[in-house]
Amino acid sequence: MSTFIIRRLLQAILVMALMSVIVFFGVNVIGDPVHMLVSPEADQAEIEAAIRRLGLDKPIWEQYLLFVKNAMQGDLGKSFIFGEPALKLIFHHMPATLELAFSALFLAVLIGIPLGLFAGLNPDSPISKGIMAGSIFGFSLPTFWVGLMLILVFSVELGWLPSTGRGETRSVLGFETSLATVDGLKHIILPALNLALLKISLAVRLTRAGVREAMGQDYVKFARAKGLSTNRIIFVHVLKNIMIPVVTVMGLELGSLIGFSVVTEKIFAWPGMGKLLIDAILQLDRPVVVAYLMIIVVFFVLINMIVDILYSILDPRVRLQDQGA
Amino acid sequence: MSAVLEVNGLKTHFFTRAGVVKAVDGVDFSVSSGEIMGLVGESGSGKSITGFSILGLIDSPGRIVEGSVKFDGTEIADAREEALKQLRGNRIAMIFQDPMMTLNPVLRIDTQMIEAILAHEKIDRATARERCRDALGLVGIPSPEERLNAYPHQLSGGMRQRVAIAIAFLNRPRLIIADEPTTALDVTIQAQIIHEAQKLTRQTGTAMIWITHDLAVVAGLADRISVMYAGRIVEQGETDDVIDRPRHPYTVGLLGSVPSANKRGQRLYQIEGMTPNMLALPQGCAFAPRCTRASDECKTAPPIQKSGGSRIRCFHPFGEGGRA
Ligand SMILES: Nc1ncnc2c1ncn2[C@@H]1O[C@H](COP(=O)(O)OP(=O)(O)O)[C@@H](O)[C@H]1O
Ligand code: SF4
Ligand SMILES: [Mg+2]
């Protein structure tokens, strides 16, 4: 178990190092942030002062070495735009993104698994066919379009739900959250649903496929031959088996929910990390972009690790030591 | 001996897109308490479907289209699902072919045993668990208490099949349908399991249907044998009669392919031709295309001939002496 964790941490460090190189030099190729920062009327002296202030006068490899040296001490640099430490900016926006991602995951599980279960148990029913057709839409409609439609229908036409911002937040365990107030909850429904749509479809398909497969297995037939009730067969024998792939895949999807909340945050003006990233990219705010991507790597590694542990708990046949890297 | 199970004219058909598969097409037999009946035939002949039909476990597109299944004198072929649930695992139990697949991989052995009791009896878990432990001991599983806490993958195939047998006997059923329970196991384990099953059947007076494709297995185990071909029973009789004096050409062929029945050094006999296509069975006797004795007559359905305790479905059976 501990070797497993150590191996994962080493992997994470390696990926982070690679990522930092790519992004650091990549942003440099795209453009010169100085032009974004100083006013067009600025004279040569002002521009040079700005360049020196940001440390951009040194050769790029020297800038990188400095970055690595500071990163070792937990300092990922200051935002070119805000002058604040990049990490602090990201952590400030993180709770909004995390609550959105977790709400979306929660919705995906809450809606997707029961629908998938129904479709898997009644494959020939017209309702099941409707569910499956719906899931195809969930997969193929672009997020931004669905987001706009949600706003159009529920905010503009019906006026039921607000379409921008987090609404009223309250501090829980030191984090500001929309989930603790009625107004906040109203605000999070549309963006969470928008972000969840693809994952609902995924949960439906995974669950349905799992149920269909399990129902044909000998162990289900044997359970029926034992005279067990239908409920016990479905909710113990079948569900316990399909939870293995469902938890694994949905858990791993949490990473992409956090990473890809960018579009949804932009549409619903949700003040999370995604919006911060978009702004940072547009302004070539390199320290923020680098720091954001490194944080995302950490998230992915952490989530992978937790999912692996969950997997070994759910499936008695798996032990973590047995798994390869 | 009173008949525990009487099956008469049972027909179970599958209505597939490609056509109607008459998996079981007019099967008659009966089993009495303490008796073991061997149901023998090549793969695809309808043995498993016969077993599942008795338990009412036929899923669409299949269904029982005709016939009667009397269990302890009560008709159950058309029984409601709730009534069947009370019989399954309680009065009639089933053991499956592949022990690697029959136990749920994510549930512990005790969970899978205790639920089989609690589905039919209102007793507390501790008592149920004790009974499970005793049942494991009875089928020759060492240190049953530890095995109860194990997951299926921690047990060998032979051990898992013993667990399945223990589950089958848990509620002291009147009838056990054992569907090729030793086919997936190696020969030594096979012999042990057959021995255990036989002992338990005799001790408890349970009736047993032992399904297999291997005549050699039932030769030393069954009291009576029914030979099945393409959904029908073609020969039925006391084990000694069927093994020593087979009369139906298919039974003769099956026996010819059993190693022990051959003289040393002689080539193993194989029944000519392919197993029949269940969607396009020939008119009349389904065995005709592979039969060395077939005549024009065989294009019509052969009648059932009775002699002594035996029944043969053939126009030109081998003589009482074994050869015509
Ligand atoms: N669900 C099904 N749909 C269509 N045909 C089926 C189905 N299940 C079984 N059959 C057919 O019924 C016949 C008998 O099957 P089975 O009883 O399993 O044979 P076996 O004697 O090997 O146990 C086979 O030809 C098989 O193709
Ligand atoms: S009825 Fe005719 S074809 Fe069928 S087994 Fe007998 S002899 Fe052969
Ligand atoms: Mg079979």
Image (cartoon, coloured by chain):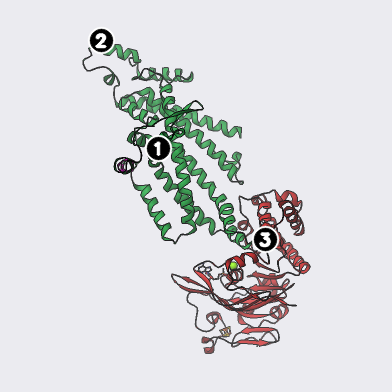
Q: Quadrant of the N terminus of chain B?
A: bottom right
| Percent coordinates x, y for residue B245 in the rendering | 70, 82
Q: Residue at x 41, y 60 (%)?
A: A126
In the rendered image, what is the letter of the chain coloured green?
A
Q: Few, some or many C-alpha atoms within 10 Å of disc 3 (few <14, some 14-19, many ≥20)?
A: some
Report whether the residue tagged 2 is closer than 8 Å to ligand 1: no
Q: Position of residue B60 (x, y in %)?
A: 50, 67
Q: Residue at x 56, y 52 (%)?
A: A235
Is B160 placed left or right of A253 in the picture?
right
Same chain? Circles 3 and 2? no
Chain of the residue under label 3: B
Q: Amino acid at mark 2?
A: Ala
Say whether mark 3 and mark 1 are on the same chain: no
Q: Where does residue B187 sit, x and y in percent of width and height?
A: 69, 62
Name the foreground residue: B237 vs B14: B14
Secondary element type, mark 1: helix
Q: Where is mark 3, residue-wise?
A: B120
User: In front here: A23 or A288?
Assistant: A288
Q: Residues within 10 Å of mark 2 (few under 14, many from 20)?
A: few
Neighbour class for label 1 at 10 Å: few (<14), some, many (≥20)?
some
Query: In front of the other: label 1 or label 2?
Result: 1
Q: Which residues are magenta?
A: A145-152
Using the numbered discs, state the Cα–Cα distance from disc 1 to disc 3 in whole angstroms.
49 Å
Image quarter of residue B315: bottom right
In the rendered image, which residue does mark 2 sit on? A45
Tell me the element at label 2: helix
Q: Residue furthest top?
A: A45
